[in-house]
Structures are given as C-alpha cells and as structure tokens.
Amino acid sequence: MANSRGDRLSVKARALAAGLAAGLAALAAATVAAEEFPSKAVTIVVPFAPGPTDTVARIVARSMSASLGQPVLVENRPSVGGIVAPEAVKNSRPDGYTILIHHIGMATIPILYRKLRFDPLTDFEYIGLINEVPMTLVGSEKLPPNDVKELIRYVREHKDKVTFAHAGVGAASHLCGLLFMSFVEADVMSVPYKGTGPAMNDLLGGQVDLLCDQTISTTSQIRSGKVKVYGVTTLRRVASLPEIRTLDEQGLTNFDVAVWQALYAPKGTPRSVVRRLSSALQAAVRDPQVIHRFAELGATTYPPEMATPDALEVRLRSEIARWRPIIDKTGIYAD
C-alpha cells in the first residue's frame, strides 16, 4: 500500500517536473527570440486596399526599417469594414513579425459587429499611435452643387438618387457620412467598398457622388481640380489646404471627425519585442522626413510620447466610449 502511494507521488512529481521543464524551456526560447528580434522582415498588415491607411503604413515602414535593421514590408488584406486583417493578425504567431495598422475603425468595430471574432481591447498588444488626419468631404465633378449650402439643398431634394461612397460599415468614411446625413437630416444611398482607394476611383469616374476621405488621399485630387471639395471635417482648417473652409464654418456646427492611425501586435507578443517595435515607431514619428511627408498630406504626426502602448490604450478606450452612443442611436450594425 505504501509502495503504491509512493509510486503515485513519484508519477505526480515526474509530471510536475516535466511540466516545469517545458515551461522553463518555452520561457527561455521566448527570451532568446525577444533578444534577437528582429532577425528577419517585419510585415505590417493593412486592412484596406491601397489608399490612405496604406500610404501611412508605407511612410512609417521605411523609417522603422532603418531603426530595426530589417525590412518592414506592407501587406494589404482588404475587406469591407476592415475586419479581416485584424482577425488574421490576432491569429498569427505572437512574435512581432506580423503586426497590424488600423485607424479609428478599431474603436467602432466592437460596436458595429456584435458577432466579431476578435476583441480590439483584449486580443492585441498596443505598440503606439502614429498620426491624426483630417478628412474632407468631396464630390464628383458631375455633381451640380458648388458649395455646402447648395449641396445640402440638393441632397434633401434628391436623396433617393444621391450616393455616398465609403470603405465599409464602421470605417471613418462611413462614420463621416453618417454624421453628414444626420446634420442635413436626409438619408442617401450608401455604397460600401473595400477601402477608399476604389471608392475614390469611382468618384473620379462619376459612378458615385460623395465621399469623406482623409486628406492623405484627397489633397492631390483637390489640388488638381479632379473633385469638388465641400469642406474640411475638423474644427480647424488644414495647413496644406488653407483655403478650404471647414464644414463647421459653413453652418454644420461642431462637425468634427478626424482619423487616427496606430500599430498593434498579437496578444502574447513578448514585452521586449513590443518595446522594440514601439521604440522604432517613436523614432519614425521623430524622423523629419516622416513629419514632412505627413504634413504635405495634411496629417499631424503624434509626438514620441504618444507612440507608446499606454497612450494607444487610453485613446482606443476613450474613442470606443465616444462612438458607442452615436452608433447605438443610429441603430446601424454590420451584422
């Protein structure tokens, strides 16, 4: 009997020792991997087709590559609403080699999608904020109105025919469109795309009438006269387009929508790896070439103290709290 009990204890002890050894081995492997990071290319996954978020990713990637000493690649995984890329990054190996760039949509996704397969607050490690970008409300050259007052009247009179393009339910372009329709008290036909790049192409071709998009995408089109611009969506004018009045100035009081961009890693990525990525991002937002390039496109680069995990978490939580009552009031959900 005593031997039987001793045998059981011996088996348990061996199992415990084996488990402890495996755990220590895994910890050691993770530590070595973190110390060697990066030893190969890092990929930034973009949730949309080539367009403004893609542009931000490529500008930042070049600078981060110099800091990390390895290539930083950009991969587009577009989908309506930008939900495929976050899920893919969430399910990738948490080693820092596959990271996500997303914008304000990370704050609206958990509100709009009630059956989401990931949680922005619990399934990711935060790397840091990149920049903030104003938007502009632009229209097709074929659209008759030439200013906001004419546009409001036209939309109200032709709401069954006017089309508003956006990058999917919950995208910044969609939220901006919802606010505009709320302000003018008229619902028009929404046309979703897998990013504002394809939406802009159709706007230029006259297939759709209106689009809210980041100045990163619209500045060159506005300067070339290929689109009609009705106003800036933030309370301040854009330094790169100083002659364009805000919608607030033109009667849509307190109309204020800006897009912020940030980087995320899969949950469980070693802290030292997250710190290394955040450090490279902080170097990027200090980079004069990055600051100048974003300024040309009307974007404001965040200071290095905002390109941190803590700052991103605070911003994400506050934005979810801001948009939840607005979206819930509309009753518009993506699923």
Image: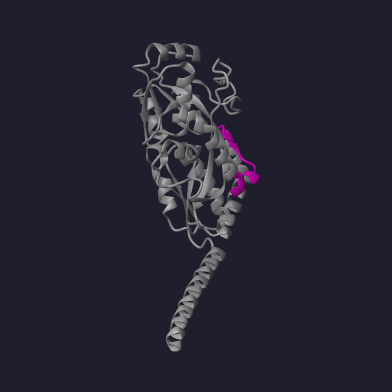
Name the residue at 49% across, 15% down: 148
Tell me residue 281's x, y (percent). 58, 49
Residue 310 at least partly seen? yes
- Whether residue 225 is visible here, answered yes or no, is no
* Residue at x 44% of width, y 26% of height: 330
Q: Nearer the viewer, residue 85 or 23?
A: 23
The quarter of the picture where residue 315 lies is top right
The quadrant of the picture occupied by the C terminus is top left
Q: Position of residue 226 (x, y in %)?
A: 44, 23
Q: Is residue 150 left or right of residue 299?
A: left
User: Residue at position x 55%, y 67% from top?
Assistant: 31
Please check the rendered image and state whether residue 260 is part of the magenta-colored stretch, yes or no.
no
Q: Percent from the top left, x then y, of residue 10?
A: 46, 83
Q: How many marks?
A: 0
Image position, residue 223 (x, y; %)? 50, 25
The type of colouring in the image is one colour
Residue 300 in magenta? Answer: yes
Asked if residue 85 lies left or right of residue 62, the reply is left
State whether residue 163 is above or below residue 52: above
Residue closer to the observer: 133 or 115 = 115
In magenta, the rendered stretch is 295-312
The quadrant the N terminus occupies is bottom left
Residue lying at the far front in this picture: please name it: 1
